[in-house]
Image (cartoon, rainbow, N blue to C red):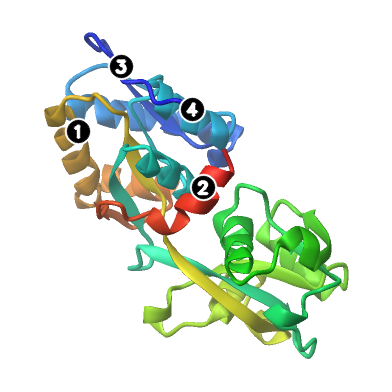
Amino acid sequence: MTLQVPSGPRHSFRFGLPPSLGNETARERAERLAAFLQRALGKLVEVSVAPSYETLAKDLLSGRADAAWAPPFVCARMEAMGVRVVVRGVRRGMSSYRAALVCRTGAGLSVERLKGTTAAWVDRDSVAGYLLPTAYLKAQGHEPSRAFFAQHFTGSYRGALEAVLDGKADVASVFCPPASTGLSFATGVEDVLGAGAGRRFELIAYTDEAPNDGVPVAMGLPPELVSTLESSLLGLQSSPEGLALLKDIFNADRFEPAPRMGYRALYRVALASL
């Protein structure tokens, strides 16, 4: 995949959204975001929902999209190829998260004792539900395809965790707050399965942290347009309309400036998934 820098005047600004929004509400929310950005940027804005994360990445790299709301592994791909991520989401006061490899309480598993077990993952494009834990295992010298007897994709964190509880799998991975919060893997488990569910699992290992979703911008955009987009997104929290957009589209409390090269911890796994 090659990076293409658009040339010539732009008659509209194209903003991409990930498929996680779902088809039912995507059009209405896209229209709301387009109306907001059109006022903020002073030009025609087109907002579209990509059919896949892969398409979202390709649209950014080819210049078919000028900016996008992208999951961490897409942001990492973009950064690794020289694309700037201007802002990232903040949730519960946190701008990053990590994954926890877990098993049933009493199973007594460790990273060194995974041989022959079965893993239940969320999705091949899920950062905490697949990419972070498999990258962690590889870094520890355990190739998942050889360490596990079988690997299944359930499509959701609930499905993966319930597979472990039901005995259909031995290991799963769940998102959880970063170490600086003092919160444990149980927080992520209970976010998915409800209060008290954390005690039904025990920790195998925590992964490195990954930044939250962000907004990368295509190469070649005028600096003043990038600056206006950044300031507009950072100011969303200051109005009722903006707060509604943050909640409904971005699942965030607010945006913060994204540090340069802030997604580098995911470069290896993101590029490997191309």
Q: Amino acid at mark 1?
A: Val
According to the image, label 1 marks what residue? 226
Q: Is residue 216 above or below residue 168?
A: above
Q: Position of residue 201 (x, y in %)?
A: 70, 82
Callout 3: 10 Å neighbours few (<14), some, many (20+)? some
Q: Position of residue 186 (x, y in %)?
A: 58, 80
The earlier-in-sequence mark between 1 and 3 is 3
Q: Amino acid at mark 3?
A: Pro
Q: Are marks 4 and 1 in contact (CB under 8 Å)?
A: no
Q: Quadrant of residue 226?
A: top left
Q: CA distance from mark 1 to mark 3?
A: 15 Å
Q: CA distance from mark 4 to mark 2?
A: 13 Å
Task: Name the disc covering residue 270, or none.
Answer: 2
According to the image, label 4 marks what residue? 58
The quarter of the image holding the C terminus is top right
According to the image, label 3 marks what residue? 6
